Amino acid sequence: MVQTLPAKALTLKDLREQFGLQWVQDPTFFSEWHGPFPELTSAERSLLDQTRAGFFDLLDYPPLLEDVVRMSVLDPLLFVGGFFLAPFQVRSEPTVTLQAEADGLLFQGKIDALILKEQLWVLIIEAKRATFSTEAGLPQLLTYMLVAPQTSTPLYGVITTGNEFVFVKLLRQAQQPCYRISKGLRLRDPGVNPLYEVLQIFRHLSQLAIASPQH
């Protein structure tokens, strides 16, 4: 009898033991999230400033759940970035299943938002409660990324609590998938609005994914 487990129940240890997933410490493995990137327009910066301010206002009314995080932060970010327009497609919460190679295990879960170029997975967005650490969502996000149809091109994802964004790169090769994450970009960080850099990274990674050959 096949046992079914929710994707959110998995740990990094589970993924390492079941699928050989390895964390890469070499920073050059995921250099794509570093700038410099093209500058944003003044209109884009203004909209992102409003998004940041709106999120801070919502913090006065906890708990800030996934749907609220998505409406207040992710949806405006995707809109400003043009991800609701072709060649992208945003599909909300499709169920995915991951088949382990040993012990007859099936892992199932849902993706909060998936940006597609035809059948190419460009970005995976996993929105968690704002009070959670992004580390809590990493095993779940990696589980979803492991079921992507292509096997040799890089996959990119992002985990967000609304306040913090962390980008992820996964590469499946030679039966041993490898991943690395970026530093966290937090809306409460002082100085320039961190959403500027978040949008720039989003755009850059999506263009890289679109340019990659489909397998």
Image (tube, rainbow, N blue to C red):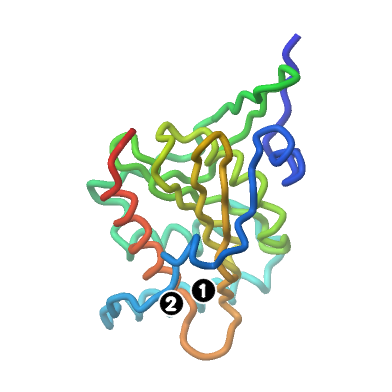
Contact flag, marks 2 and 1 (Cβ < 8 Å): yes
Residue for point 66% across, 38% down = 20
Dot label at residue 54: 1
Dot label at residue 50: 2
Left or right, residue 161 beside residue 198:
right
Q: What residue type is labelled 1?
A: Gly
Q: What element carries label 2?
A: helix
User: Relative to 124, is 160 above or below?
Assistant: below
User: Relative to 106, is 48 above or below?
Assistant: below
Q: Where is residue 84 in the image (x, y as percent from the top left)?
A: 31, 51
Residue for point 66% across, 25% down = 100
Left or right, residue 153 beside residue 110:
left
In the rendered image, which quarter contains the C terminus? top left
Circle 2 crowding by C-alpha within 10 Å: few under 14, some 14–19, many from 20: few
Q: Where is residue 54 in the image (x, y as percent from the top left)?
A: 51, 73
Q: Choose top left, top right, bottom left or bottom right for residue 35.
A: bottom left
Hey, which residue is sitting farthest front in the picture?
174
Q: Which amino acid does label 2 sit on?
A: Gln
Hey, which residue is sitting farthest top in the picture?
1
- Foreground residue, 90 or 135? 135
User: Relative to 112, is 200 above or below?
Assistant: below
- Foreground residue, 199 or 131? 199
Alpha-carbon span between mark 2 and mark 1: 6 Å
User: Relative to 164, is 117 above or below?
Assistant: above
Residue for point 60% across, 81% down = 188
